[in-house]
Image (spheres, rainbow, N blue to C red):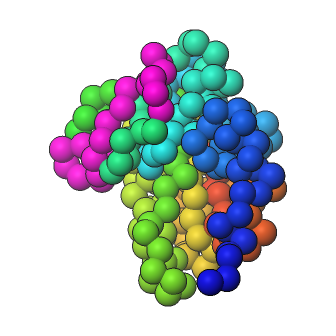
């Protein structure tokens, strides 16, 4: 059986494991935050689609620096042991009525971050449509739960209606743009949409 490039640990994967992060995605958030200052010490942050926990752990370690808190929500539990003291873990569907009510009770938020992706099928149309749905749901959460001047980061698959989502974001934020981190795999069609300074 041929070995896929994704089956091999690349530079970012090895670096993540050596630094104690569950996944290489941590370096995407590092790059995004360095460029746009999404999160600062003292913030209350919502991480949607948080498992296995790299973005949550990086936010705890490097961005909040012991001041502030993170609400991390995913269908699956975080792969962090121990769970950092700044983290409130909620396991379940962030868009269900029950879990959404819990997220609302923990808010409002200074930043919402989401590296969430759908289970992929290999069918580009199906996968991009599912990705667009997730992105739209997180934008709706941000409209309701972000504080004024709050920031948003969401992942979406290119070809999945990202221009329409950006158009919506431009009505909610003073600045909205697409960003592709260097830490994204070369063959990945993911892109991140960034909303800065909510009205």
Residue at point 53%, 34% (across, down): 56
Percent position (x, y) of residue 72?
Answer: 42, 36
Work out whether residue 53 or residue 195 is closer to the camera in this orientation and state it. 53
Residue at point 74%, 47% (across, down): 14
Q: Quadrant of the N terminus?
A: bottom right
**In the rendered view, would you say 46 is above or below 184?**
above
Q: Quadrant of the C terminus?
A: top right
The answer to which image quadrant residue 59 occupies is top right
**In the rendered view, would you say 117 is above or below 59?**
below
**In the rendered view, would you say 12 is above or below 119?**
above
Count of marks overlaid on the render: 0
Percent position (x, y) of residue 80?
Answer: 47, 32
As drawn, the residue found furthest toward the front would be: 1
The magenta segment: 80-100
Residue at point 58%, 58% (across, down): 155
The answer to which image quadrant residue 165 occupies is bottom right
**In the rendered view, would you say 96 is above or below 164?**
above
| Residue 173 visible in the snapshot | no
9 falls in the magenta region: no
Is 71 placed left or right of 20 in the picture?
left
Percent position (x, y) of residue 66?
Answer: 58, 12
Residue at point 36%, 32% (across, down): 89
Percent position (x, y) of residue 183?
Answer: 76, 54
| Residue 128 visible in the snapshot | yes
As drawn, the residue found furthest toward the left would be: 98
């Amino acid at each position: 059986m041929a070995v896929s490039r994704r089956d091999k640990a690349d530079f970012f994967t090895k670096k993540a494991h050596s630094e104690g992060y569950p996944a290489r995605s941590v370096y995407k958030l590092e790059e995004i935050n360095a460029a746009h200052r999404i999160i600062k010490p003292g913030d209350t942050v919502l991480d949607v689609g948080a498992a296995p926990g790299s973005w949550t752990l990086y936010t705890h370690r490097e961005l909040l620096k012991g001041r502030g808190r993170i609400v991390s929500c995913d269908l699956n539990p975080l792969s962090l042991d121990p769970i950092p003291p700044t983290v409130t873990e909620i396991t379940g569907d962030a868009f269900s009525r029950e879990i959404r009510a819990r997220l609302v009770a923990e808010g409002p938020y200074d930043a919402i971050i989401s590296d969430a992706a759908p289970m992929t099928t290999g069918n580009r149309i199906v996968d991009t449509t599912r990705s667009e749905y997730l992105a739209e749901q997180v934008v709706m959460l941000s409209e309701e739960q972000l504080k004024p001047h709050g920031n948003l980061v969401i992942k979406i698959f290119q070809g999945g209606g990202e221009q329409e989502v950006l158009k919506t974001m431009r009505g909610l934020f003073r600045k909205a743009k697409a960003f592709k981190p260097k830490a994204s795999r070369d063959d990945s069609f993911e892109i991140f949409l960034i909303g800065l300074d909510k009205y």
